[in-house]
Image: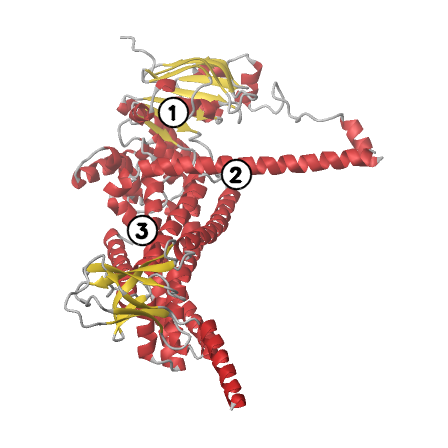
Amino acid sequence: MNRSTIDLWVGVFVVLGIGALLFLALKVGNLASFSNSETYQVQGRFANIGGLKVRAPVKSAGVVVGRVADIRFDNETYEALVSMTLDYSYQFPRDTTAKILTSGILGEQYIGLEAGGDGVMLKNGDRVRLTQSAVVLENLISQFLFNKAAEAKEPEKK
Amino acid sequence: MQQSPIVEIRKLAFGYDPARAVLRDVDLAIARGSVVGIMGQSGCGKTTLLRIIAGQFLPTAGEARVLGQPTAQLDRHGLYAMRRRMGMLFQFGALFTDMSVYENVAFPLREHADIPDDLLHDLVMLKLQAVGLRGAAQLMPTELSGGMARRVALARSIALDPQLMLYDEPFTGLDPISFGVIVRLIRELNDSLGATSIIVTHDVQEALEVVDTAYFMAAGRIIAQGSPDDIRRSAEPFVRQFVHGAAEGPVPFHYPAPDYAADLELAAG
Amino acid sequence: MQQLEQLREHARGRLERLGNTVSSQVWRLGFASRFLFYLVMHSGTALRRFRLTVAEIYFAGVLSLIIILVSGLFVGMVLALQGYDTLQRFGASESLGVLVALSLVRELGPVVAGLLFASRAGSAITAEIGLMKATEQISAMEMMAVDPIARVVAPRFWGGVISMPLLAALFSAMGIFGGYLVGVQLIGVDSGAFWSQMQAAVDLRNDILNGVIKSLVFGVAVAWISVFEGYDAVPTAEGVSRATTRTVVSSSLAILALDFVLTALMFTGGTNQ
């Protein structure tokens, strides 16, 4: 096993190894994330964020336009303070609504942005005024039961 | 012109742990250009003495001066500088098994001197020619006999033209022909290099044929020294037993044991 | 009364030995750390004469390729089989790609590749250095004024450290390919869903990068243990064989323990993560 053969095989090995890393990075992972493009941050307050997690997607019309960067609790207004990082190429009006939605019925939660009609756009550090909290399953069920009970009472009255 | 001794040892003591002393109060001075033998039984401390001269161990007491410098005061840099002027032949050669004979002999040259490949080739061939193995340059160490391996190791240890050659049991396990070859090489190399050689061995008859001065060690001390003739005629009982290979003498045949009769009775009763 | 005395002596003897074992292991760990520090400080030769390290990358990395690639393939295939069986019960069979990819990239890639590396390359390095010590080759090198740690040990250490992440990546890649073969080609999961869900769920920074960091840490651990055990081996045949066994056992335990620590640090958060 002479030197040049060893060099050749080591070269092949290193190329294969780096190739595997590239494969993992490009084909397997989401390299097309916003690590390269410019971003800006906006914030939103929610009464209840449900199961929203950091790095959850921020979508508009179903397309991912950003990621949830940070979730905090505001001890004075007793609301959740969510910071979102949005891709700079997507601009939203100041009266955009941010809703917490669920993908599928029992899937992951994400933030959906519905654009308003205002001429002025959101800038870095702005706050999204209109928000809608997550649907909490227990509240939904209790509301359903309450409605059912109310309906049951109505025919009795009549 | 009287030159200072190449190795000077004064009141040297050494022990691997404080309880067991391997060397006690050793004094010796080795003149430049001579071939010296240090002999004794296995375990008498002669190999340890050699390693102290080589700088592998530091004396616990006393001083060892090699090539003019006390080994105990050398830092790593100084120690390596000293070793570049020494060559050591290990008992079984200690050739690098993943390299060919050529590569083994070229190793010290490559590591310490920045010389172009064709000059390196000539030097390696020169050293191999001196030990008679130029034709074996492309063999691997596993393909060599014991005697040949030792000769290649010898070629490797003289690669940098050392001033001091150390031999650790060079005659062990050799057939008479290989032995004759090694003896001739030790003498020739010593004289042609203008070097000094120290041979540690327990092969007395063989050693007495090649050395100028012999030192005898027992229990960590030097008990006799002189020219080969002096040693052969020595009246010192231990030396006599050693030189003539007698089974009985100061070194007893029996390992210390309890009373024989008592031992037998115990087993029977 | 005498029996109680004997018992007490026996117990004390046992405790003393246990204490000695523990303290000697701690001492050994300190010695190994100094060894590593010295090794890294004297790595100049290994990096300047890169040929030496390249040769070691060959022996540690290239010669481990077969076992890594084959094992990776089989692990990926089994993941797909087992994963499909469970996922399809929840109607989530389209997430098979996610399952296979995340399991491999986060955990199985670095850990299994590390274990295989330790048993194949790590034991070989230990045996090699131990044998060199036993046949006095290390002493001979010292006598020729060449630092054996810089010349022999450091290239093997760095060869191991460089090879490990590459092998782990190859393991994961092969595994994902194996998962694809079984999941899409054999079982019939939708190819588009397999890859697109995988891409959506596997994050470059959090999953892949963390996996690479893990494999680097494992590489350092295995390489360190291998060269140290070889250098510290008792220079006899039995000593070398015991050192080789110790390398494999210690490396495996170290990988699993470090995996726990790293996973806890990297992948669990606590707060909305």
CA neighbours of label 1 inside 10 A, class few (<14), some (14 to 19), many (20+): many
Q: What's the distance in space between the residues labelled 1 and 2, CA to CA?
A: 32 Å
Amino acid of disc 3: Ile
C195 relative to C10, above or below = below
Give the residue at x 38% y 82%.
Answer: C188
B220 relative to B124, above or below = above
Q: Name the residue under label 2.
A: C25
Q: Name the residue under label 3.
A: C162
Q: Mark 1 lies on which chain?
A: B
The number of numbered discs placed on residues in the rendered structure image is 3
Q: Residue B54 carries which label?
A: 1
Q: How far from the left and from the top, in percent, is residue A10?
A: 27, 55
Residue most toward the left? A119
Q: Mark 2 lies on which chain?
A: C
Left or right, A35 with respect to B53, comes to left
Q: Is residue C272 or residue B192 the one in the foreground? A: C272
